[in-house]
Amino acid sequence: MLVIRNLTKSLGGRTLFEEADMTINWGERVALVGPNGAGKSTLFKMILGEEDADTGSVEQDDYAITGYLAQEAGDPGEETILEIAIGITPELQKAIRVMREGDASGKTETPEYHAAQDTFDAANGYQLEPKAKKILAGLGFKQDAFDQPANKFSGGWIMRSHLAQLLVKEPDLLMLDEPTNHLDLMALIWLQQYLKTYPGALLMISHDRDFMDGLIETVYEIDEEQLISYTGNYTSYLDQRQKRYTQKVQAYRNQQKEFDRLQEFIDRFRSVTSKAAQVQSRVKQMEKMKRLPKPIKPRKVFKFNFPQPKRSNQKVIELEKIKMAYDDNVIYENLELVVERGDRMVLVGPNGAGKSTLLKILAGQLEFQEGERNAGFNTNLGYYSQHRTQSMDESNTVLEEVMASGGDMREDEARSILGSFLFRRADVHKKVRVLSGGEKSRLNLVKFLVNPPNLLLMDEPTTHLDIISIEALLQALKHYEGTLVFISHDVHFIRNLAEVTLHVGPDPKDPEGASKLTRYAGGYDYYLEKSGLDDGRGAVTA
């Protein structure tokens, strides 16, 4: 389906690929991995024909259709969510309008109506619409959202509609760049299951380890300007990569020993006439040997120690008889919750059940209609949200902002922590005001880590992080001695961190009523066992 041969590409004076090869077969599920800046997005652009190779070729089968989902979508016009999902063209849009007007007025026998119907039939419209609705529902859209203008929705929901469009079209090669970034856990689960039976091939860039493990059968890593193929999922790739690195190290050491042996002979007998032929032979032997590059260690998780917070009271925070409603929509009624010192609590449950609302109530970010919120006397609360970056000094550099938060932290320590969270080299000298939303979120996260409060509330902290950064965050929080309440759609993260599971969801006896809390005094696997759920990801949204 897709064959890349002898691909060479330089960008900004740096060689990304040199005579690299890659093959994707029909129906194959492939992940492309590598550090930031390695060339993943550039390779995608070359496959899409948006960027030319210096040398080599990128070939696809005749008539094969490629579909691509970027990380961000442009601003929508007046089209509805359903129209985006269908992939509506101006011609098809006009036909639909004529048909709707004809149906509303009862004038369905006009030439205009029949012409519009022919256009609709030619586009397979009657099959497209129900398929689009099914996919939109799977991605979390409610039925009443289908006919609403897309410009009324957030960027994340607009991205979902564009993902739906691709799935409706079913291209032969589906290219996805971080497809889980804008998905809640329920939509992510649905997408993972959907893609397992997708009829075309799949090429994706993702930082969601569990998502890849459930889908991928081949991993291509960008390493030393090559595309290295590994058979298996992401976890298998990590094992194979370590073995490959060990082999490369051994080969390099063996070659260095051989060079040293030859050089020693040359140096020893260079001036000995009787040995001239042997010396010359060894010189030629060295010249013919292709020197192996010194193997570069795979990037590892940076482990760091940060100041531990001041000890809180046993009862860190308590909610009593809370009523929370948005207009007529009652989220909580008589809500009761006690968070105790040392809890590591994950909030799980279906989308819209009120997990983020509960976290905001705990954080004091939402006013509720009834009840009391009581924080302990010694409770020092910190609330991490992707959208809460107001506490930063816009005039500071990234490094200055962290140093100001970290007390006696040394500059080299601050640089190391920032590097682990994707701020490298010149990035640390950027002004806070020029950072993107994702960069500000990551910087806010680092500030929490270098000077943590004794109650840490975190809403989707792994968004905007790569896999190594997620692991660094996980290791840091494992050593955190305060109290933690968090929401995440990353099952690997949850499983390794949570010690208490709080299920947020409607009462089965009253599915239309307010959400209730069910506490499980154990981690994620304990919750699975006690709840009777055996689908590791599905349990989080049950």
Image: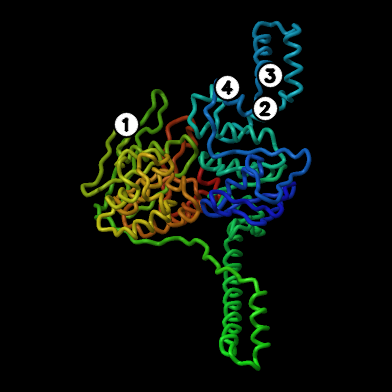
Q: What kind of residue is marked 1?
A: Phe
**Percent coordinates x, y for residue 493 in the rendering:** 47, 53
Q: Disc 4 marks which residue?
A: 79
Going from the N terminus, do you reach mark 2 or mark 1 first? Answer: 2
Mark 2 or 1, which is nearer the eye?
2
Q: Position of residue 306 (x, y in %)?
A: 32, 58
Residue 453 visible somewhere in the drawing: yes
For image coordinates 34% across by 56% down, the residue present is: 414
Q: Nearer the viewer, mark 1 or mark 3?
A: 3
Q: Nearer the viewer, mark 1 or mark 4?
A: 4
For the residue labelled by badge 3, is the local secondary structure a helix, a strand or a loop? helix
The image shows residue 105, relative to residue 155, as above or below, that is above
Q: Amino acid at mark 3?
A: Glu
Lower sequence index among marks 2 and 3? 3
Q: Please, is residue 381 above or below residue 425 in the view?
A: above
Can you identify the residue that label 2 sits on? Answer: 130
User: Mark 2 or mark 3, which is nearer to you?
Assistant: 3
Q: Earlier in the sequence, mark 4 or mark 2?
A: 4
Q: CA distance from mark 2 to mark 1?
A: 40 Å
Q: Quadrant of residue 353?
A: top left
Q: Secondary structure at mark 2?
A: helix
Label 3 neighbour load within 10 Å: few <14, some 14-19, many 20+: few
Q: Amino acid at mark 4?
A: Glu
Q: Is 522 or 181 nearer to us in this picture? A: 181
Whole-number angstrom distance, CA of label 1 to CA of label 3: 49 Å
Instruction: Identify the residue under disc 3.
Output: 91
Q: CA distance from mark 4 to mark 2?
A: 18 Å
Kindly indicate whether the residue at mark 3 contacts the one at mark 4 (C-beta within 8 angstroms): no
Viewer-proximal residue, 15 or 275?
Answer: 275
Q: In 3D space, how far apart are the residues under numbered discs 4 and 3 (Cα atoms)?
A: 13 Å
Q: Which mark is residue 368?
A: 1
CA neighbours of label 1 inside 10 A, class few (<14), some (14 to 19), many (20+): some
